[in-house]
Image (tube, rainbow, N blue to C red):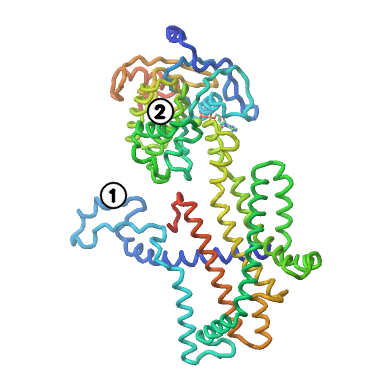
Amino acid sequence: MAPHTEQLTRPAAVRLRGLTRSFDGRSVLDGVDLDIPAGQFVALLGHSGSGKSTLLRAVAGLDHEVTGGGELTAPERVSVVFQDSRLLPWRRVLDNVLLGLDGRDADRKGREALAEVGLKGRERAWPNELSGGEAQRAALARSLVREPELLLADEPFGALDALTRIKMHALLRVLWEAHRPSVLLVTHDVDEAIVLADRVLVLDHGRIGLDLTVERPHPRSYRDPLLGEYRERLLAALGVTSDVA
Amino acid sequence: MTISTSTSTSTSTNTSTSTSTQTSTGTDTAVNAAPTVAAVGAVEAVAAVEPVGAGDGSRVRRRRRRGLAPGRPWPASRLAGPLLLIALWAAASAAGRLDTGAIPAPWTVLKTGVHLWTDGTLTTDVLTSLERAGYGFAIGLVAGVTLALASGLTRTGEALIDGTVQLNRAIPTLGLIPLFILWLGIGETFKIAIIAIVVYIPIYLNTHAALSGIDHRFVELAEVQGLSKARFIRQIVIPGALPGFFVGLRLGVTGSWLGLVVLEQINATSGLGYMMFQAQNYGQSDVILVGLLIYGVFGLISDSAVRLIERRVLSWRRTLSS
Ligand SMILES: Nc1ncnc2c1ncn2[C@@H]1O[C@H](COP(=O)(O)OP(=O)(O)OP(=O)(O)O)[C@@H](O)[C@H]1O
Ligand SMILES: [Mg+2]
């Protein structure tokens, strides 16, 4: 991981050494080594079933019942965005954002977070009155209001339509620039990964198979021809050739 | 458990009846619209294509699709059926088609009701019955909720309580009457105890099922958001279990009236059922009908009250009936 020496002067937000996880004796993560410096935006690609969610859940500390070992360091304040918005249907949007938050100005922070994701005025709406994209934005607000040092997202836009997804990409990048948490974004969409992330990882056979730094300025365009080279390399690492037929 | 089973069937029949009447209006339109809609989910495409091929513009106008939900409820629609029944009854009586000894006219029943009310006997009987049902229901409600919370939220509680309640459920509650009379005497206590059992079982079962069936995704969310155990229960488990609780509550309310009727008809020395039992001995079918009507009104009012509370508390739910 030579390209990152200059960033390693900052404390690593996430540090994994020899992380293993297995289900019923079948190894899914087979010694993952990974450092994510504070404030870096990382995307994680991999085949379906390659263990992306398993890795993310391990970092989130959500895998109490999974066997495995290794060394894992993660920050104190971690937020997770799931593929579904996971809003509690019986709490209004603002109360969902404030779930688990304490303090006198929690309410103000919650309103600000909702305004940031463009949901100002929808504070008192019920979750099932929101569209899919709005619900996912509310979920983003809920994860940001806690000022996370690390934001974990498991295919957060997987259930959205293509147009909404592009808007959400821009929003996520803007939010990241404003708050600068470290991000680990799990996705199966190569374009999403190279447009959003500064560094793209490919999980392969239980290890990080490819670790690619994307050096293009933001905001990036999907049509940027220079991104094509990254796309080729990632698709090759995923065992896919880009030309159809 | 015979009791709560039969109640549950009767409630579900009510709902399905009202739904089916309203869907039938929807079906008409669906039949009309059928030729215009080529394939399910292709409404947009149909609208775009049709004006081109259509000669007379009248048939192609795209209808707004009728939803599958039964549609907006009519105001006070619940009363329509009962009112129609009463009208038929009145008409048949007026036409002299009914044997007045078996089925007296509505106005005779009304007159008897007013008479019984003014001379005070009815008031006493009604109050006695209400008191029994009320106490039994209150005890059953508290017991059902407490036991459900204890067994739904703790493993010890589940080990001790759930199996016991399932056992209790397997014994038909009315079969307990002779034993309870031996234990508690033929006074009020045994009646209240039986009603309480009839009420607590459906409340326990539904609340417990809802508590233990909490969506795993919400558990995960609570962990991610760093909720304490107490907050998790207060903000996620309990609100999530409320819909189940209300199902149990409605079964419990109906159950309390059913238990009451049975107890008062078999082992009564006072109350509405006793009044009807006496009337049977003297062949006063009008008095029996007065009693039945009052039971019916009680049932209707209490069920509506629970529905009203349910709608308030669960206002976040957009269901078919809203
Ligand atoms: N709770 C579990 N019990 C048993 N096996 C599991 C469990 N969770 C995951 N697995 C297995 O571990 C492997 C990796 O799963 P994981 O969900 O991490 O894949 P993924 O990379 O996120 O895939 P996808 O892109 O489809 O979401 C899969 O083969 C899966 O079947
Ligand atoms: Mg996954």
Between the residue at mark 2 and the residue at mark 1, the CA separation in whole angstroms equals: 30 Å
Would residue B278 be found to the left or right of residue A8 on screen?
right
Residue farthest right in this picture: B182
Would residue B99 be found to the left or right of residue B3 on screen?
left
Specify the subunit that label 2 lies on: A
Pointer 2 residue: A189
Q: Residues within 10 Å of mark 1 (few under 14, many from 20)?
A: few
Residue A120 position in % (x across, y down): 34, 37
Q: Are marks 2 and 1 in contact (CB under 8 Å)?
A: no
Q: Is residue A236 visible to the viewer in this orientation of the structure?
A: no
Which kind of residue does numbered mark 2 sit on? Asp
Residue B139 position in % (x across, y down): 66, 58
Residue farthest bottom in this picture: B96
- Check the image and report above or below for A28 versus B21: above
Residue drawn at the location 44% of the way across and 35% of the way down: A97
Residue drawn at the location 28% of the way across and 49% of the way down: B45
Which kind of residue does numbered mark 1 sit on? Ala
Residue B53 position in % (x across, y down): 21, 55
